[in-house]
Image (cartoon, grey):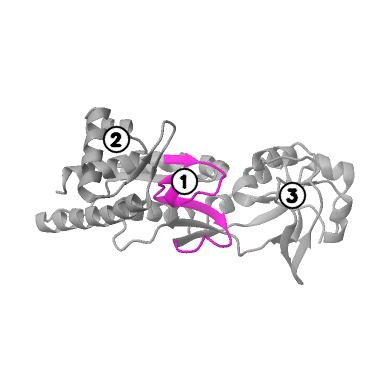
Amino acid sequence: MMDPDYDLFAAIAEEGGLAAAGRRLRISPAMVSKRLVRLEERLGARLIHRTTRRLALTAAGERLHDDLRDIMAALDAAERRASGAGAEASGTLRVSAPTSFGRMHVAPWLGKFMDENPRVTLHIDLSDAYADLLATRADLAIRITVDPGPGLAARRLATNRRILCAAPAYLERFGVPQDIADLKKHRLLAADEQLPWRLTGPDGPVTVDGVSHVRTNSSEVVRELAIAGAGIALRSLWDISAALASGHVRQILPRCEGSADVGLFAVHLPQPHPPLALNAFMDFLAELYQPTPPWERTAIAPAAQGF
């Protein structure tokens, strides 16, 4: 068992506040503050920046938190080896995921994960903002990207297939594009900063530039516009497969898709002894999405004709 003040500091860092740490440890916020000050005085270092609005770890606090995580993981493993107990994931796990993907392809399975890992406490943060693992205190982030980011441990879970699609009503009104050049005549739909589209065709990379028919910062709005017949969109299969299967949208130009370099990754800060809960959650995601993710197993309606 570690020094109780180290346990206290770890709880503050993981819960993101003094009051939340107090509730977890069943002590008053005043006692949490008193013991934190005592620890800082003993170490001769400020560990946490405290303001009326937010709490953030200092550089020294970040280093201590990282060290304590490794120590706690090693202690837990040592105790289990000594007692002969089997390894079991436990503790708090903070996970960040993109909003739509998290809602559609993470949240429905969390109950199963919790049933299989009853000693794990999950905190799920859904946001389309780039998750800085240090700033957000996330243990793991799900990222859909070409590059998971420097200095991170990353596990590729799936390729993020993206297809061009439009609603039958739109194609009946404006016609089916026969080649990439035809897209210049059509209404394109994309969230801010998602154009130009970088595709891969039979002759190699293709770039499609233009201006979205409707300006929006929301990828979910783009999906709904496409289903409603407002234009042509480049959508991830995980996002649009149900609409494809139901016929609400149809794939166009099926020989051109988004670059296969874009993948679905689970990323975390590198550490010598990752917590069992972290490994268990990554393994759980891998079982969900590999070898073929569920959104690619869904029956897809025939593609509209065209290059």
Q: Which residues are magenta?
A: 124-152
124 versus 161 height, above or below: above
User: Residue at (53%, 50%) from the top-left corner?
Assistant: 294
- The percent position of residue 69, horizontal first and vertical second, equals 28, 53
Q: Nearer the viewer, residue 11 or 121?
A: 11
Of badges 1 and 3, nearer the viewer stands: 1
Q: Amino acid at mark 1?
A: Ser
Locate residue 176 relative to residue 272 in the image: left or right: right
Which residue in the protein does label 1 denote?
A: 96
Q: Residue at x 26, y 32 (%)?
A: 22
Label 3's element? strand
Q: CA distance from mark 1 to mark 3?
A: 28 Å
Instruction: State the image coordinates of residue 148 (x, y, percent, origin top left).
Output: 52, 60
Q: Is residue 91 left or right of residue 259?
A: left
Tag 2's secondary structure?
A: helix
Give SS at disc 1.
strand
Pinpoint residue 287: horizontal percent, then vertical percent: 42, 55
Residue lying at the far bottom of the rendered structure: 203
Residue 252 occupies quadrant: bottom right
Looking at marks 1 and 2 on the same chain, the residue that comes earlier in the sequence is marked by 2
Residue 146 part of the magenta-drawn span: yes
